[in-house]
Amino acid sequence: MEFKKQILSNGLSVIGEINNSAKSAAVGFFVKTGSRDECKEINGVSHFLEHMLFKGTEKLSALQVNEAFDKTGAQFNAFTSEEMTVFYAAVLPEYLIQVTQLWAEIMKPSLRIEDFDIEKNVIKEEIAMYKDMPNFDVIDRCRKLHFDSHPCGNSVLGTDESITNLTALQMRGYFANRYAPNNMTVAVAGNFQWDKFISTIDADCSKWKTQDAPRIIQDHSGNKKIERIEKANLSREHICLMSPAVSAQDPGRFASSVLAAIIGDSVGSQFFWELVDKALAEIALMQFVAMDGTGLFCSYISCSSENTPKVLDIVKNVFDNLKSSGVTEKELQTAKNKILSALVIKNELPMGRLADLGFNWLYLKQYRHIDDDINSIKSVNQKDIHNLIEQYDSGEFTQLSLGPKK
Amino acid sequence: MAEKLDKYTLNNGLVLLGEPLRQVASVAFGFMIPSGVARLPEGCCGCCNVISDWIFRGAGNKNSRQLSDALDSLGLHRAGSVNSSHISIGAALEASNLSQALDLYADIILRHSLLPDQFQLAKQLAIDAVRALDDDPRQKVMLKLREQFYPNPLGRSTAGDIDQLKSLTAQKTKKIITHNFNLSHTIFCVAGKYDFDIVVEQMKNLFETDNQLPVKQIHTGEKTGNYTHIENEGAQVHIGLMTKTVTLADKDYYNARVAVSVLSGGMSARLFTEVREKRGLCYAIGARYHGLKEAAGIMCYAGTTPDKAQETLDVIKDEFKRLSHDISEDEIQRAKVGLKASLILSSESTSSRAAGIATDYYMLGKVRTLDEIKDNIEQTTVDSVLDYLRRNIFEDFTVVTVGPKKVKV
């Protein structure tokens, strides 16, 4: 593995990790913009814009963009979160430059009004689709409740109303401000030649203009409200719990991942033994969500309405016990083993490596070799976990439930 | 589709397959046990999910908790699935822990405790999983689609039926396990970093017997329906559509795969272009090949708001029918490049390689090499794909919808 880096004069960060034994390469354009960078009037614009980038440029129509990607056989896509918008592709090494040139080209979208109007329908269909996925919907709504007016509570998709009212002009303004080279990172991993790659990026991206692209960074402790929303067509109770945690920049993020796995991994965790193994809930998970300047512990539980009071009592006990008794050395070691093997398996693929490479650069402006992450997980000890428990009480949570009419 | 294949057959017929991958530190392994839903006796739909859970609730000298802790302490990532023909269990893990993991899986497969109190919990979870499908219309529509498309019992729901699950007893389930956990027709696969000689030696010690047992054949009956609508006051109508195609063993298999790619391989493929890009009818739209050993179909899903549901279905059906009229050279080239690239990209993952070699062996009785697959894809042409499509016209569609509005089929 060899790390490469160059910052272009316009501020565009270009980073790469070479693994010549890989059969493929993965490339990504990581834009540090997401729903947390939106105001209410344009909520959903980051995600809508992500779709619009595939709609073509001065040189290419939407169909030509899609055809050009498909000609390379690339497995490509994009996603938008609260934190970032990422365009990525996994590809055979001989097509890497071609795909990279395509990404660079579509970073200059035309944002044509006729494409904007048709794509608006697609976005509304996507909003409708997620309404039929209560496991997603409940997390989205809980985030809003937890963060209240803090920008991290903004929905990625926006609402039917915000999307209906959004204009192409507003989107163009947002694009001009946020898709600035100094607010972006291009990352590449796997089997590639750095010299060729960097000269491609230099040729295609060095004329992009630097812009001021600020982000409000503020920690938030959550408002700890409890709400339940009824939906007639649901048959299960979908419960989301959120409590504050460390940020993506905090060294405590490794201990936080371990703690979340101890409490809520899909098998062998405290939630698993207390809820799933006993058939009180079919799903009970907890995750650590690291964000820019803030963080979350997020739990999701699906169970019957009859079992809900019992399930919530048990969850309370789990969190109370955590405060009074901490975690055992055995729990700690097991969780670390699981995280470590997942890390190794994921990073064996250039696509998996690309994600970590990009995220680390976006949050930390730092290259971390896989061994750095492995060592950070290995070094988490009981004291780290207990400090975390003391500092962040998972029992003090915001709770949102979606369930059938009572 | 191995580059190098290791193979050994134990005296009892259990086949061991391996594909070494260079430059990985992990290994993935799996057991395909001939105990899928189509092999269940009548009235036990859902039993496979109970079995997959129950066998992990204590085995060998370990109770449920001790077994789970032992698996977790090896850092292994469990994978399990149920399909028409098999229950598959396995894991991906750091290579040095493989031997210990195989010891534990031998306990799980051969020396499961099957305690009655643990049965009740496994059964309750299986029932709850079926109930939870009501809140997952997309999954529900695809399960119902397979049930209606394939001749019974091939399409039986892998999730199960609540009434049949309720009437299931521990005794009955135990009998099914004894009968269907047939080592003579079990396939073991391993991919990644391993030493095959060591694996063979250990597997012989753990699993070899002198008994060769026959496997229960699946007898197929009639297809059970053409259109079903399930009412649900959700935001979208979830549409599932399926039509017949050839199986993996058929000489037209690669023509069929290229045809499906022209229809829905990438973002420039026809369904995405016509349904989403030009008309904005859907966010989620796609079709894929779905094959069993006995039968295969092209399976399509679209989710759309109620007032667009009819138009969406009509456009999809038109695109299926239009495919045999004309395909351009460019479309075929894109489809071929896409198929070849995804083949090579998936060959980097230990889990997908392990599953791939086992499935090939079950379907074909052999494992295809990467070059063989590439050559077969390469040999398809506009004429060969059109010729296949014209001999296999898409005219019989099985359709299932879940949502607030019915469609006309």
Image (cartoon, coloured by chain):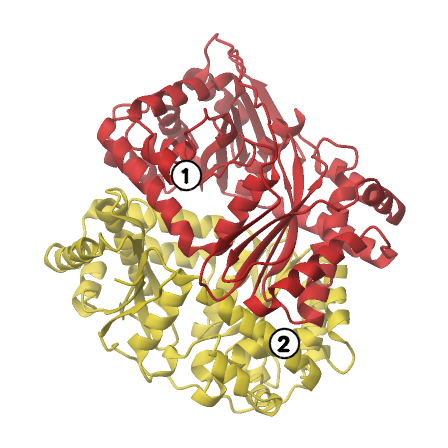
Q: For the point 18% across and 48% down, which residue is it?
A: A328
| Residue depicted at 69% across the width and 76% down the height | A55
A285 vs B60, nearest the viewer: A285
In the rendered image, the vertical position of residue A43 relative to residue B140, given as above or below: below
Residue at the disc numbered 2: A119
Q: Secondary structure at mark 2?
A: helix
Q: Residues within 10 Å of mark 2 (few under 14, many from 20)?
A: many
- Give the crowd class for mark 1: few <14, some 14-19, many >=20 residues within 10 Å: some
Q: Quadrant of residue A209?
A: bottom right
Which residue position is annotated with label 1?
A: B161
Tally of numbered tags: 2
- Position of A56 with respect to A306 (left or right) is right
Residue lying furthest left? A324
Q: Please provide percent x and percent y for residue A37.
A: 45, 84
Task: Kindly indicate whether the residue at mark 1 contacts the one at mark 2 (C-beta within 8 angstroms).
Answer: no
- Distance, label 2 to label 1, CA atoms, is 40 Å
Residue A315, percent from left and from top? 20, 56
What kind of residue is marked 1? Asp
Whether marks 2 and 1 lie on the same chain:
no
Amino acid carrying mark 2 in the image: Glu
- Residue A34, compared with residue B262, is above or below; it is below
> Chain B is shown in which shade?
red
Q: Residue at x 25, y 55 (%)?
A: A305
